[in-house]
Amino acid sequence: MGIHEFEPRDENFDGKVRESFALQEAMKTIGCSIDSLEAGKIEIHFPFNKALTQQHGFIHAGILSTVMDSACGYAAFSLMPADAAVLSIEFKVNLLSPAKGDAFRVVANVIRLGKTITVCAAETFSINGTKQKRVANMTGTMMAVFDREGIKN
């Protein structure tokens, strides 16, 4: 993934992202935490949990997709104005290798920033001791939402 430098439209993006992330019950259920955050980029970590596996003992593709979707959303959200909320409008996942490991690291970056639509990319790596292996990729399209009833930051 290419690395791009972006200027946040909200100087309090860090607090805004972390506050929103803390409200996501799905991320709590999976055991996700933010490892690092900067304008246009986020890294999320989660441990292996047998309850999140499919029939072969690998982390389920739906779980990987869920975390990568949130990572892309928060990478985009970090660059949005203070009065914006974020929603996913499209994503595509490539499953590259069985998701087995002690833990997982998801890295998402903004690829193209627009006023309303932002395109992001995410990668998921399995972690086994000191070894990491890419197991999935996502391309996601996020939308800045303003003044929509029932949707807030």
Image (cartoon, grey):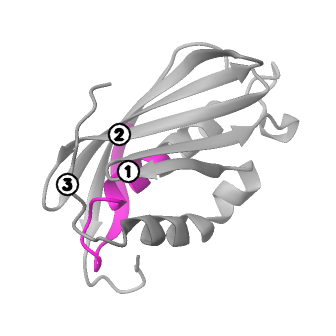
Mark 2: amino acid: Asn
The residue under label 3 is 117
Percent position (x, y) of residue 117? 19, 54
Query: Is residue 49 placed above or below 142 in the rendered structure?
Result: above
Q: Quadrant of residue 148?
A: bottom left
Judged by depth in the image, the label closer to the viewer, 3 or 1, is 1
Choose the circle earlier in sequence order: 3 or 2: 2
Give the quadrant of the C terminus: bottom left
Q: Is residue 78 magenta?
A: yes
The disc placed on residue 83 is: none
**Residue at (37, 67) in percent of width and height:** 13
Choose the circle earlier in sequence order: 3 or 1: 1
Residue closer to the observer: 77 or 67: 77
The residue under label 1 is 75
User: What secondary structure is marked by label 2?
Assistant: strand
Q: Tell me whether the residue at label 3 lies in contact with that at label 1, contact meaning CB atoms closer than 8 angstroms.
A: no
The magenta segment: 71-91
Instruction: Determine the CA span between mark 3 and mark 1.
Output: 13 Å
Crowding near the residue tagged with mark 1, few <14, some 14–19, many ≥20 C-alpha atoms within 10 Å: many
Q: Tell me whether the residue at label 2 lies in contact with that at label 1, contact meaning CB atoms closer than 8 angstroms.
A: yes
Side of 11 relative to 108 (left or right): left
Give the quadrant of the N terminus: top left
Instruction: Determine the CA span between mark 2 and mark 1.
Output: 6 Å
Percent position (x, y) of residue 22? 61, 68
Query: Is residue 61 placed above or below 22 in the rendered structure?
Result: above
Q: Residue furthest right?
A: 50
Query: Is residue 113 placed above or below 80 in the rendered structure?
Result: above
